[in-house]
Amino acid sequence: HLSRHTFTLQSRNPAHFVLQTAMRGDVASFYRGEIGYRESFRFPPTTTLIKLSVEGEKTETAEEMRRILDLLGGYEVSVFPAFIPRRGGRRALSALLRLERGVWVDDKLLEILKNLPPSVRVEVNPDTIV
C-alpha cells in the first residue's frame, strides 16, 4: 500500500531501481528485479542460508571453526571473518551453508547442528551475513 503520510528519503542515488519502485509503490516490479539478483547470488528466498558463528581468542576460534568444518565435510560451506569490532585478542568467524530451494536440513545436518556446542551461534536465513 502507498504511504498515507509524508516522509523524507535522502539518497546519493535517487535514480536507483529500489528507490524508484518504492516511490511508485510498484512491489511487483521490485520483486521481478530483485529475485534475479537473489537467484544469481543464491540468497533467500531462492536458497536457505544457515550461518554458524564463533567468537573467542584467535587460536581457539580458528580451532573451533576447523572442528565445525570437519563435521560439515559433505556440505558446501564458506568461511569468512565476521564483521564485529575486535576486543583484545578476540576474533569472530562465520561459516555459511547454502541449501537449495525446496531442500531443508536433512537428518545428518540436523544432528550436526543440534550437537554443536552452545558457544556456536546458529542462524537460519540471518538478517545479515557479514
Image (cartoon, rainbow, N blue to C red):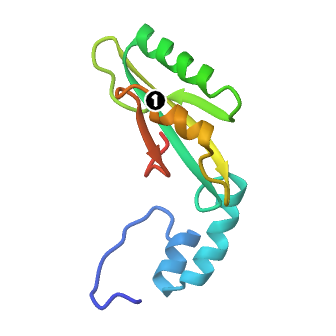
Above or below 86: residue 3: below
- Say whether residue 13 is left or right of residue 37: left
Residue at (43% x, 16% y) in the render? 61
Please count the marks in the image: 1
Please tell me whether residue 102 is drawn above or below residue 128 in the rendered image: below
- What x and y, as percent, mark residue 123? 44, 44
**Image point (42%, 11%), residue name:** 60
| Residue 73 figure quarter | top right
Q: Is residue 8 left or right of residue 93?
A: left
Give me the residue at 54% from left, 32% from top.
112
Circle 1: residue type: Asn
Instruction: Pick whichever, 41 or 104, lies toward us.
Output: 104
Res. 117 in view: yes
- Secondary structure of residue under mark 1: loop
User: Does residue 11 sit above or below 77 in this rendering?
Assistant: below
The residue shown at (61%, 52%) is: 104
Residue at the disc numbered 1: 115
Q: Position of residue 76 (x, y in %)?
A: 69, 35
Residue 2 quadrant: bottom left
